[in-house]
Image (spheres, rainbow, N blue to C red):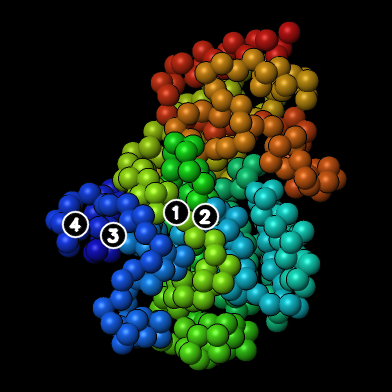
Amino acid sequence: MKKNYGDMTKVLHAGWKSDSATGASSLPIYLTSAYQFKDSEHAARLFALEEDGHIYSRLTNPTVTAYEAQLSALEGGVGAVAFSSGQAAFTHLITCLCSQGDNVVSSNKVYGGTVTLLKNIFSRFGIETRFVDGDHPCKFEEAADERTKLFITETIGNPLMNVAPLDTLGNIARRVGCPLVVDNTFAPYLAKPLEHGANIVVYSATKYISGQGTVVSGAVIDGGNFPWEDYPEKFPTLAVPDPSYHDINFAKQYHPAGLTAKLKASIIRDLGGCPSPFDAWFLHTTISNLPLRMERHSQNALEIAKFLENHPAVEWVLYPGLESHPHHDLAKVYLPKGASGMMAFSVKGGVEAGKKVLDNLELIGHMANLGDSHSIMTHPASTTHAQIPPAERAKAGITDGLIRFSVGIEDVADLKEELSRVLEIASK
């Protein structure tokens, strides 16, 4: 797949041409756990990673591989690894790169599930997370030391819609000697983190990549632009011979896709967070129209944000596409094709008024999801971020009255009518 193809061409053609056995042009769902070896020597070569091929579907599967190639092409990476969820993607990645005594520096304005994974799970294994104000890149450098293995941020923060200063963070990460990991769940196609200093991109593919609210999945895209081989003591799982896999030096043998190879051959082998072939097939299908959907999400959201900003019942609106957003200038740099469909707003009257909005929705869904083609509202303080103590939520800017709005691709006039109705109820 040529690098200079457009994104729509990439998602339509990357990863799959036709089935060599039957000539079928559509991607089949390879529902199989294992694969027939040609002979004992063939099996040995596969297990020794001396030959490409499929051994067992926890490791690789033809349907999954086609979807991964599609994701990698869209993102501009050297490889991608699909997982059973976005949480599984982060879990496998951190397990791959971090050990007891290491630390991670993360923006404090990230998804609540990411916060609790780092704070409540990995802390038990001696991996510390230092949360800093993600809007101030210098805080990352101040918090880092020689045991810092990752910087973590989100292109568009969840749920405050802050836009990360990616280029600056990338420069700091290079000085520190650690990869910059960017969760791009809110902005697939719209943002290209690997072009702006990121080394690794993470997705909850459950959201926009699916767009239908039907599957749960995640992914890690390897930028191939971090020099693992320069840091053998810091990243021994990649840059020194691996005793758990025939003493392979993944960084050297699979350069520049050493991270991809390690995740597939070793980490997912041991942790097992693989996606199902059916889910990969479904996502391969839905990603084919992702660029069109993201443009429509962005168009609708900008119009809705302007509508809410001028509504007398609304206290404030946070949407990067609005000139009033504090990071609008960053959005113009990193989100040139649109600022996604995500926004946050607060209704005058506080929590009780917000509850009236949510309890009277008819067209717009009230559920714990986002990035669906259908519009969805969520109250983070009582759902996605409820497990975070109130003081920490407040410190991160997540007020009790904040409503997260995932604007869908419905006719925008119908969304405005729904909003007018519920805001009138809430204002009484």
Q: Amino acid at mark 4?
A: Ser
The picture quadrant where one finds residue 151 is bottom right
Q: Nearer the viewer, residue 107 or 210?
A: 210
Mark before the other along the chain sequence, 2 or 3:
3
Residue occupied by mark 2: 84
Residue occupied by mark 4: 18
Residue 276's label in the rendered image is 1
Q: Give the CA separation, mark 1 to mark 2.
A: 7 Å
Q: Quadrant of the C terminus?
A: top right
Q: Amino acid at mark 3?
A: Gly
Residue occupied by mark 3: 15
Dot 4, how many residues are within 10 Å of its Cα: few (below 14), some (14-19), or many (20+)?
Answer: few
Residue at far right of view: 391
Q: Give the CA separation, mark 2 to mark 3.
A: 19 Å
Q: Give the CA separation, mark 4 to mark 2.
A: 26 Å
Contact? badges 1 and 2 (CB < 8 Å): yes
